[in-house]
Image: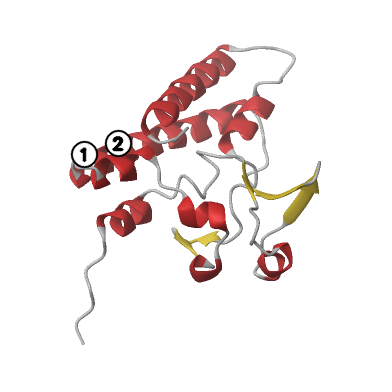
Amino acid sequence: MIAEPLSAAARLCGKCGMCCNGVLFHSVVLQPGDSARTLSALGLRIKHKKGSSFFLQPCAAYRDSRCAIYDQRPQRCRLFNCRQLLRVAAGEITEASALEKIHEARARAEHVNTLIARVAETNPNRALAQRCANALTAPERTPAHDELDAAMQELETLLERDFRVS
């Protein structure tokens, strides 16, 4: 039996992972039909607040650049398609163009991570924006803080324009 080639979405998602690793989002809200108990048993740490159930990013099931619970992932994860995937599917851009944008965003995120490490010690199990905000709360502002702030703003602009979907 010959294995089917991966779809463009599978190839791009495998190179990206920003919807799982805490770069794009800080949390994922569970939807009707999602079982908090099942997801907890699969290793997700479900939190409850104001009648809503959610888990924080980076996702505990995102390991080795893939989802360890792919077949049982929450509805939001099943339904999410970033702007790059939507544009490739619509024929607006090529897969190669989307991959370039993914590489750019990941490089910017890594740069922000490097700057965070220079400014403050933060919890690596928190979303990138939260870690950046925590690093920027130092009482004394240095040029490194300003560089981090600018880099995060540039990354957020890119993510909003090219990845997040309203």
Quick check: 23 left or right of 2?
right
Quick check: 84 left or right of 40?
left
Q: Amino acid at mark 1?
A: Ser
Which quarter of the figure is the N terminus placed in?
bottom left
Residue under label 2: 101
Q: Contact, CB < 8 Å: mark 2 with mark 1? A: yes
Q: Is residue 113 above or below residue 158?
A: below
Q: In terms of image quadrants, where is residue 108?
A: top left
Q: Any mark on residue 97, and which?
A: 1
Disc 2, SS = helix
Between residues 166 and 130, which one lies in front from this camera angle? 166
Question: Where is residue 164 drawn, in percent x and y?
Answer: 45, 35
Disc 1, SS = helix
What residue is drawn where x is 47% and y is 22%?
Answer: 151
Question: Where is residue 100 drawn, in percent x and y?
Answer: 25, 39
What residue is drawn where x is 65% and y is 21%?
Answer: 136
Q: From mark 2 to mark 1, how far is it between C-alphas?
A: 6 Å
What residue is drawn where x is 75% and y is 14%?
Answer: 139
Between residues 152 and 52, which one lies in front from this camera angle? 52
Q: In terms of image quadrants, where is residue 102?
A: top left
What residue is drawn where x is 31% and y is 54%?
Answer: 9
Quick check: 140 left or right of 151?
right
Give the farthest residue toward the front. Answer: 32
